[in-house]
Amino acid sequence: MPEALVHDLWSQQRFDTEDLTTTNDATVTILDPGTPNTDAGPDFRNAHVRLGDMDWRGHVEIHTTSGGWFEHEHHTDPRYDSVILHVTLHPDMWTGGLLRSDESPLPEIVLYPRLETPLRELLHAFHTRTDDDTLPCASRWDEVPDETRWDWIRQLARTRMARKRDRLPITKDDALETALHERLFAGLGYSKNDTPMSTLAERVPPDALRALERPRDREALLLGTAGLVPEPGDLLDADRTTADYAMDLRDRFR
């Protein structure tokens, strides 16, 4: 069973998510499956999952069976302590008993009982798909009228924005403002730095920025909180303009 198939099931949410629960019967709401990770570490980065009544942001690890967690020695690797959810296709003797390196229990869901398409069909589609991931109708794209193409693209854009909208809390205005603030910062961080940018947004809320009238003071607050204002000793080789700018930020941040 290719693990990449399970990755596809998770990223495309091709399973029944209604009344989803972990192996320990905690309710699960998937607000964002995360971004596929092509580097070392967990399979999906920066996911957003609600477990019970608590929201969690972190990473997701995927295996065909629960035992893969131990087989790959993730239970001894601190890099995987940020995993908030383990996703397995099939249950085995390890299901429901996964631990991180700090010995904290790892929530887990099993996909097989919730597949909406028979596994045999999913496997066939997986093994017969084209390597370049083109759409089946790509060869006839030139036959599609321009108006139809643009209607489709606009619909895709609306769908994408609706998904982003649905991740925002429907609560009082200040909570919505905070959520927009955090999503804006995460977007500015792109895929590689969205987590630290989200953390920065939490540490510097909108009210803190509004309280500062001068743009340079806001700049100093953001860069200082992020730990990006250099120490004086790091400026020995800097030109005068850069050194003066950095020292001005330090003075303002203090």
Image: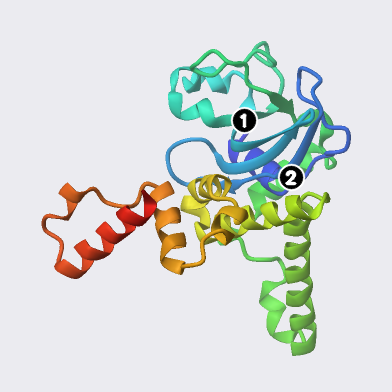
74 in relation to 137, above or below:
above
Residue lying at 43% horizontally and 61% vertically, measured from the top left: 217
148 left or right of 36 in image? right
Q: Nearer the viewer, residue 117 or 187?
A: 187
Measured as percent of width and height from the top left, residue 163 is found at 76, 57
Residue lying at 79% horizontally and 30% vertically, measured from the top left: 53
- Mark 2, other Cα within 10 Å: few <14 / some 14–19 / many ≥20: some
Q: Residue furthest bottom?
A: 146
Q: Name the image quarter holding residue 147.
A: bottom right
The image's mark for residue 29 is none
Residue type, numbered disc 2: Leu
The residue pinned by badge 2 equals: 31
Measured as percent of width and height from the top left, residue 111 is found at 75, 32
34 left or right of 24 in image? left
Q: Is residue 176 visible?
A: yes
Cα separation, mark 1 vs mark 2, equals 13 Å
Q: Nearer the viewer, residue 111 or 191?
A: 191
The residue pinned by badge 1 equals: 84
232 in relation to 94, above or below:
below
Measured as percent of width and height from the top left, residue 46 is found at 58, 43
Q: Residue furthest right?
A: 19
* Figure quadrant of the N terminus: top right
Q: Name the image quarter holding residue 143.
A: bottom right
117 in relation to 62, above or below:
below
Residue type, numbered disc 1: Ile
Measured as percent of width and height from the top left, residue 216 is found at 41, 66
Q: Residue furthest left?
A: 237
50 in relation to 211, above or below:
above
